[in-house]
Amino acid sequence: SRVPFSLLHLWVLHFWIVLIGCSSILKTVSVFLILSTVNLLDSRSVMGDLGWVAYPKNGWEEIGEVDEDYAPIHTYQVCRVMEQNQNNWLHTNWILTEGAQRVFIELKFTLRDCNSLPGGVGTCKETFNMAMKESRYIKIDTIAADESFTELDLGDRVMKLNTEVRDLGPLTHKGFYLAFQDLGACIALVSVRVFYKRCPFLVKSLAEFQDTIPGSEASQLVEVVGRCVNNSLPLYEPPRMHCSTEGEWLVPIGKCVCQTGFEEINGSCQVCKVGFYRSLLESLACSKCPPHSMARQAGSTACSCEDGYYKIDSDPPNMACTPPSPVSVVRKGLTGKSSIALSWAEPDRPNGIILEYEIKYFEKEQDSSYTIIKSKETEMEVEGLKPSSVYIFQVRARTSAGYGAFSRRFEFQTSPYSTSERAQAWIVAVAITLALVLLAVVGFLRCGYSKAKQDPEEEKMHFHNGHIKFPGVRTYIDPLTYEDPNQAVHEFAQEIDVSFISIERIIGAGEFGEVCSGPLRLPGKREIQVAIKTLKAGYTEQQRRDFLWEASIMGQFNHPNIIRLEGVVTKSKPVMIITEYMENGSLDTFLKKNDAQFTVIQLVGMLRGIASGMRYLSDMGYVHRDLAARNILVNSNLVCKVSDFGLSRVLEDDPEAAYTTRGGKIPIRWTAPEAIAYRKFTSASDVWSYGIVMWEVMSYGERPYWEMSNQDVIKAVEESYRLPGPMDCPEALYHLMMDCWQRERSNRPKFDEIVCLLDKLIRNPSSLKKLVNSSHRVSNLLVEHASVEGSCSTRSQNVGEWLDSIKMGRYTELFMEGGYSSLETVAQMTSE
Ligand code: AMP
């Protein structure tokens, strides 16, 4: 009835011989493990004596074996299952941590099933303990066999090779000991591997991220700032990545781009070739010099005009050089305190029919900031000038061949004011400026493209250092302000010859026709994959206009989280809009397909991207009106980009849009109450929609308000009910959603505050550990709304701080004197 010890011994050895046959397979597997892990101990790779200590001496014992290459194998076994009170220890030697604060221990072992022992169970155990010592011994875990592992058939018995991994941290010393305690089991410890994971050196988006050891806490992320590769620099913000304890790089933020005069080819920056230039960091590749200009050296940031051709410094770099302008003399007419009448002669030999004139003017010696007015006549009155001030005027003509060069400069002075008049004018000017700033801040200044007062034919634009600048904050230009929509398209979108595009696959259906994908090969540029939206045959002129509307809007944006327009095809049929290709398609479908597949940090990374794109749009003065997960596209790097600018003003194409009582079509579930009730669409209503997108993302594409009817949704929201926190949603994110759904729109966070908060959460992932109270998600019921202040809020400002923040701090005293001492009183100020 008793099993002789020698028999058990034999049994372990028998197993080990079978295992040797598999050792070459195990070696192949470990090659993959080495990639981002560093071994601190691997008992199988130690050639000589392991030097581990067994206590008592008749407990654990080493079996000296060699593999097929005669390399030693260290296996420790113990099998004192028939004797009472076993307490057998096996201590490793000192294992250096090499600076790692969290390590992993992988054990491979066999454990005899007590029931299979001949003669009954006796005192047999089926577990053993693992402990560690920095300064004193601490138990790590009790280790049991896991049956799901490799089964090796040994005659009539089945043996299981188990692999168990435990992690250990935070470690505070330079090293530690491991120990294994047996209390009467039959164990063969085949291998012990101690390793740490690290995020390996990585080059991404032209930034190098150094090999990084993760932090000590299980969910901690270590933020690493990347170094831009040679001849590149950061765009918008320094590139950052986050190293997780699993040794993975997560949440890329920011990127590097090649400096001007260089372009990215295969992950490095190469100089632009002779005849090419690159002037803007935002542009992807070097471009060919425009007509009648050249770049004689490689690495040019601009092209210079050929002899006999000209353009002015402030002309955009892609503008052709032209022969000198035929308008040569500008005369001054009636001069007032704030106006000067100008006239000029029509040129004798214009190179084509003159379409219009441009009058450029600025105050003398202040040429970094100038204004351009357009006129179809050869005379005009320039208004809004300062009294008694010298202005510089230049005129140029535009024909179908483009603009000519500006005429030489003409200096004219306005007539003087009396002292009292000047003081009065100053006060009026301050009041008007403040009212304008105030209106811009509260979001009333809607259109940056203002028509000059003097003549509807004349259009006025303000420039600063070569960029169009409007007096408010807005720089987005509504294509509606163009009489001819085709002009708007070509102002903002590059015409692409259809021969450069190959259509390879159909990837979706748009309102106007199929959406396809394929390569775009522009001459002198690297091939890229693009999405191609087509306009189906038999369209009306109105449909063509509506279709190209999207390109006129998209072409004005340049941001890593906004879908990028490559150009349009309008000169051949079908008409096409070409955009960058987003491999993972729209976000709602992508999330549904990958339910529960992402870490919280990955989801927050996606939300951060969307918020950053929306911050850019709201800074541009563009209100999206249809922000929803279905209108976000995802690329292969999980970067989310805002898209669908097509009919965001009419929303005819969105299947979610429903008619409201006022006749407009609105995607009710995503839209703020004030926008549903009285079409008050603002960046604050986009913030509401952003909150719904957050909810969609955290619930992996669940339909907001499930199958409730639109009418019920409106009613519930009106009665202060809100969506409950999605399952496993961090509380901090749910608070942010609830903030986005504040009834009072001025209480909702701004997009820059949202980006700031999400950045904070990403930097400190432990803040994401606390999940929403389970009572918030017991069922599909909506919850009563309670507001929570965002920690990045700037809402509790006083008047002085507010004026400082808009660089108008010098007027604080004037506000106080006028009785405007709180933001509430300021908000009630009228333009009068
Ligand atoms: P849209 O008309 O913009 O709503 O596009 C219709 C569908 O085509 C979308 O839902 C996407 O699945 C797909 N699609 C549109 N644009 C792209 C793109 N740039 N990259 C990949 N897929 C796209």
Image (cartoon, rainbow, N blue to C red):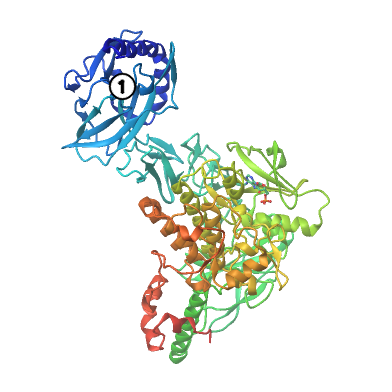
Q: Is residue 712 above or below residue 118?
A: below
Q: Name the foreground residue: 621 vs 424.
A: 621
The residue beneath circle 1 is: 187
Instruction: Specify whether 713 is left or right of 350.
Output: left
SS label for mark 1 = strand
Is the residue marked by circle 1 packed among few (<14), some (14-19), or many (20+) residues within 10 Å? many
Query: Would residue 558 be visible to someone looking at this image?
Result: no
Amino acid type shown at disc 1? Ile
Q: Name the foreground residue: 35 vs 515.
A: 35
Query: Would residue 2 be visible to someone looking at this image?
Result: yes
> How many numbered dots are placed on residues in this image?
1
Instruction: Specify whether 146 is left or right of 369.
Output: left
Whole-percent x, y for residue 669 in the image: 62, 62
Instruction: Specify whether 769 is left or right of 441.
Output: left
Q: Quadrant of residue 804?
A: bottom left
Which quadrant of the figure contains the N terminus?
A: top left
**Residue at the location (37% across, 12% down)?**
20
